[in-house]
Image (cartoon, rainbow, N blue to C red):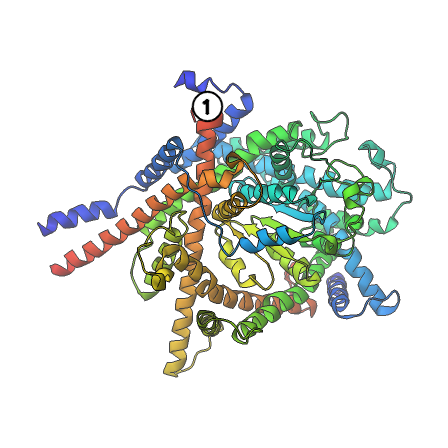
């Protein structure tokens, strides 16, 4: 029963939004209800999203607390996660170190939260992702090999882009006559981006959009109810 | 002799990955110390954005949405800085916002740096900061009808009804240009789907190098231009330097960072070629047997 | 080296440098410094997102409309009247939190329904228009241009894009026949996609290197002060 009711909520919410895109602006009737739904639902969604953050964080902290309790492998590091979570939460919710009291911007760089962001979160974030530069260099050497026609096309297009994006790419092959300027790496890489790449990516976009539409319809029509507890 | 070559190429083929890492780090470090820098040229992806801002009547506001975190800040912040310099010099008020939690900090970092060069810039008149709001594309949806509906206050808690910049802004249609500097989702894609295509207002954006190819099918129909990674920013800086504005070349961050970037590109190209030479050589030598 | 390093005496710079090096140490192999940095990142990020969500959205959009005087706490002007409609998302949010308690977890289904319903409704309309109809429109517009004065190269490019997109779609949609011509189109589609992926790899190199340059710049300049 509850699952059916939830499905009704889902379908009504989705249909109101779909209708709001097609019905004319009006104050009363179905058009008015759809228009109000289109206006209110995004704000409601934002508010609910905050609760989703809370849910996610409580699940994360719960799993780390369990790890500490059960003395699982590497449980000591879970203390770091739990304690850093608690400290940042207190510092941030109390807006410590910034403007007097609770006035002022939560993102104020002078506040304790701002300083934690600059000295902890920012370097960790940036460095974790910068590791990928090393992996890409390694992949370029180890994995990017000519093995078939497909890998050759992949390799050639990647190489043209890498060379074409050098700031002095326009100077390379500058000896070529005017009629052959399109062979210069900068011109060639721009052509690769705007022509074959656009074609490939457009095919991806169209296919993905068909997938998204199919999944959305599946949910709206109640053909998939996994999210309500795993039953069909 | 053949066995000796096979042994050499096998060694090259099985080189320790850590040696590759070290070589990359060393070459980038050397280029940083050598202060290598290259001036770029504006490409047809950024010129339409530059021209659009130039042709906008002074006083028409521009919205800059900063959907990025420290993960993509080195690529995207130079774009936002270059556009901020341009918009400010061309006389357009700028409104900043973000759909990412880290975006609030990113806005503060950027405005602290850029507006330090323009001490006369007045907050609330020439620029304003709406900060971060949870909800991703739903925030855009809300702003489409009414900005005041979802943003009761700016990032500093001041009611936006009291900020002069918002006197003539009711919704997204009142901006002369929407710009999204996006490191992922929600970002430029959501701005295209929920604002640009919906309201038919000029929209442009910038994204990380890795994301740029995915946005090109939207150009030039659904977005007027695109900053393609750091190179996009350095191209825009080049357009600024070639323009009527006098701007200190030292302020242009992307141009200065393109040096080490270029060196790293060349190193990666060398690895790519070397890897393929060793494969090819081993293939031929083993066939000779 | 020590004298160089003492150039920067800020605790925060030192902390940032330590964490940067701790993460870089993973390049050699997994180690306690990296694990420490990784766990710290998870804890700080989760709390940071919650704090931002609370102050930027929950406070101005839910607490202040329900309790106008709450605006005074942050030095803002209170709204003239309460907005009880906001109780709906607040209740839905609280119902979602019940998912933590297994006995009442099913109450959270209504919130899930609202979230999925909203997303499905908007996605259906927006993707259909922007990524399907408009993209098909772009293909048609490029082949039938509005202006008659376009050059030969533009025409050639437009025809190339049209054929390449069709062949890539053909490959994606897995249209399988025994006809040789169909398989040729499908294979051409695969090559178009490989080109696009190669372009993506080439572009990705730039982004990651930018980030690495930035971290090394931080170490040499802000921390060591030698740049």
Label 1: few (<14), some or many (≥20) within 10 Å?
some
- Residue lying furthest top in this view? C3
Tag 1's secondary structure? Answer: loop
Residue located at (20% from left, 48% from top) = B10
- Residue lying furthest right in this view? C81
Q: Nearer the viewer, residue C153 or A165?
A: C153
| Camera sees residue B90 | yes
- Residue lying furthest left in this view? B1
Residue located at (38% from left, 59% from top) = A157
The mark total stands at: 1
Q: Nearer the viewer, residue B222 or B237?
A: B237
- Relative to B10, say whether A123 is above or below: above
- Residue A211: x %, y % from top left: 57, 67
| Camera sees residue B99 | no
- Residue lying furthest front in this view? B244
- Residue C66: x %, y % from top left: 86, 43
The part of the image, by quadrant, that contains residue A121 is top right
- Residue C155: x %, y % from top left: 47, 73
- Residue B224: x %, y % from top left: 59, 58
Chain on which label 1 sits: C
Quadrant showing the C terminus of chain B = bottom left
Residue located at (80% from left, 33% from top) = C74
Residue located at (41% from left, 38% from top) = B37
Residue to which mark 1 is pinned: C225
């Amino acid at each position: 029963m509850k699952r059916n009711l939830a499905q009704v909520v889902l379908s009504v919410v989705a249909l109101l939004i779909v209708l709001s895109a097609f019905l004319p602006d009006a104050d009363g009737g179905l058009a008015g209800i759809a228009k109000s739904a289109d206006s209110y639902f995004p704000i409601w969604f934002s508010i609910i999203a905050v609760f989703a953050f809370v849910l996610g964080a409580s699940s994360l902290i719960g799993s780390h607390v369990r790890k500490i309790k059960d003395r699982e492998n590497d449980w000591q590091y879970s203390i770091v996660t739990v304690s850093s979570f608690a400290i940042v939460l207190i510092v941030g919710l109390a807006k410590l170190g910034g403007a007097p009291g609770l006035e002022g911007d939560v993102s104020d760089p002078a506040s304790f939260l701002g300083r934690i962001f600059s000295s902890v979160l920012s370097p960790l974030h940036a460095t974790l992702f910068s590791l990928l530069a090393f992996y890409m260099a390694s992949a370029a050497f180890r994995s990017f090999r000519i093995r078939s026609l497909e890998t050759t096309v992949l390799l050639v297009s990647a190489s043209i882009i890498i060379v074409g994006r050098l700031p002095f790419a326009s100077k390379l092959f500058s000896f070529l006559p005017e009629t052959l300027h399109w062979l210069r790496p900068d011109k060639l890489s721009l052509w690769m981006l705007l022509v074959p790449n656009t074609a490939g990516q457009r095919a991806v976009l169209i296919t993905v959009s068909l997938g998204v539409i199919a999944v959305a319809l599946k949910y709206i029509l109640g053909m998939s109810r996994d999210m309500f507890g795993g039953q069909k | 002799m053949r066995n000796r070559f096979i042994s050499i190429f096998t060694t090259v083929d099985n080189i320790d990955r850590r040696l590759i890492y070290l070589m990359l780090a060393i070459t980038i470090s050397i280029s940083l110390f050598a202060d290598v820098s290259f001036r770029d040229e504006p490409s047809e992806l950024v010129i339409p954005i530059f021209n659009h801002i130039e042709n906008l009547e002074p006083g028409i506001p521009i919205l800059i949405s900063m959907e990025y975190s420290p993960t993509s800040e080195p690529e995207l912040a130079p774009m936002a800085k270059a556009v901020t310099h341009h918009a400010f010099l061309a006389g357009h008020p700028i409104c900043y916002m973000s759909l990412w939690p880290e975006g609030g900090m990113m806005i503060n970092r950027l405005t602290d740096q850029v507006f330090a060069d323009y001490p006369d810039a007045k907050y609330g008149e020439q620029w304003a900061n709406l900060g971060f709001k949870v909800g991703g594309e739903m925030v855009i949806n809300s702003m489409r009808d009414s900005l005041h509906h979802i943003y009761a206050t700016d990032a500093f808690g001041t009611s936006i009804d009291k900020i002069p910049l918002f006197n003539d802004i009711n919704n997204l249609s009142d901006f002369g240009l929407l710009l999204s500097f996006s490191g992922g989702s929600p970002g430029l894609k959501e701005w295209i789907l929920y604002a640009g295509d919906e309201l038919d207002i000029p929209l442009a954006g910038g994204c990380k190098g890795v994301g740029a190819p995915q946005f090109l099918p939207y150009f030039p129909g659904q977005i007027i231009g695109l900053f393609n990674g750091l190179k996009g920013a350095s191209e825009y800086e080049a357009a600024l330097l070639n323009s009527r504005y006098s701007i200190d070349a030292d302020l242009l961050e992307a141009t200065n960072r393109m040096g080490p970037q270029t060196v790293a590109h060349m190193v990666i190209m060398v690895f790519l070629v070397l890897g393929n030479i060793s494969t090819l050589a081993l293939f031929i030598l083993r066939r000779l047997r | 080296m020590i004298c160089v390093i003492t150039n920067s005496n800020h605790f925060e710079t030192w902390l940032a440098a330590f964490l940067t090096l701790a993460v870089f140490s993973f390049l050699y192999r997994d180690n306690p410094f990296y694990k420490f940095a990784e766990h710290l990142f998870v804890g700080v990020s989760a709390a940071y997102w919650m704090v931002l969500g609370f102050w930027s959205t929950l406070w101005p959009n839910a607490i202040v409309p329900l309790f106008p005087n709450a605006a005074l706490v942050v030095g803002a002007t209170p709204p003239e009247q309460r907005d009880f409609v906001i109780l709906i998302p607040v209740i839905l949010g609280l119902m979602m939190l019940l998912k933590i308690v297994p006995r009442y977890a099913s109450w959270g289904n209504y919130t899930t329904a609202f979230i999925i319903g909203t997303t499905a409704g908007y996605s259906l309309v927006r993707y259909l228009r922007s990524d399907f109809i408009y993209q098909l429109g772009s293909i048609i517009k490029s082949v039938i241009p509005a202006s008659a004065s376009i050059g030969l190269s533009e025409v050639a490019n437009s025809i190339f894009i049209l054929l390449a997109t069709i062949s890539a779609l053909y490959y994606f949609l897995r249209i399988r026949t025994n006809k040789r011509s169909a398989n040729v189109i499908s294979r051409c589609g695969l090559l178009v996609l490989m080109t696009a992926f190669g372009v993506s790899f080439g572009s990705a190199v730039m982004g990651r290197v930018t980030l690495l340059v930035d971290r090394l710049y931080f170490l040499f300049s802000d921390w060591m002060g030698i740049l």
